[in-house]
Image (cartoon, helix red, strand yellow):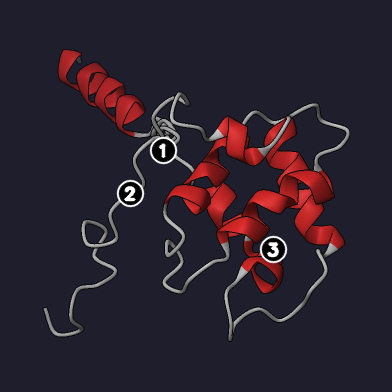
Amino acid sequence: MAANIFILLLLGVAAQPLPPAPQQPGCVEELVAFSPCLPFVSDPPNNATDSVAPQCCDVFNSAFESGDGYCFCYILRQPRIFGFPLNRERVASLSSFCMAKNGVASLDSLCSSGAPALPPLPSTTDSGILKPFNS
């Protein structure tokens, strides 16, 4: 009888759903969401437009309203973060195109040398993304 109760308890514990994985700290989602801005902020030959898309300002403002605007400091500090060059002046100018209502003076001032350190981005080599097919 005790063995049956033990087995039932063991099965009950095993049937419990796993807790959700903890949220990864960092700015990956914000950097991916920045894609509507790339046609404006890219250096030639990737600069597809001379105007900022409304979707770009939506993403930009949303990041600042949620407190994640500092993630765009990666783009100012590492202008080749996407694998192609970005125009730093155009990135910095997004503040004037998009930020009038949010009270942030500029992306440059947010990302100044006195700004806090950025969270580390996950490594693509650790995730297995870059492993050869046959390994």
The mark tally for this picture is: 3
Residue 23 visible in the snapshot? yes
- For image coordinates 88% across by 33% down, the residue present is 101
- For image coordinates 81% across by 60% down, the residue present is 55
Q: Which residue is mark 1?
A: 24
For label 1, the crowd category at 10 Å Cα-Cα, with few meaning under 14, some 14 to 19 and many 20 or more, is few
Q: Nearer the viewer, residue 61 or 114?
A: 114
Quick check: 128 above or below 111?
Answer: below
Quick check: 23 above or below 114?
Answer: below
Q: Which residue is mark 2?
A: 122
Q: Which mark is residue 37?
A: 3
- For image coordinates 60% across by 71% down, the residue present is 42
Q: Quadrant of residue 43?
A: bottom right
Q: CA distance from mark 3 to mark 2?
A: 22 Å
Q: Quadrant of residue 33?
A: bottom right
Query: Is there CB contact under 8 Å for labels 1 and 2?
Result: yes
Q: What's the residue type where badge 3 is placed?
A: Cys
Give percent across and percent down for residue 57: 80, 52
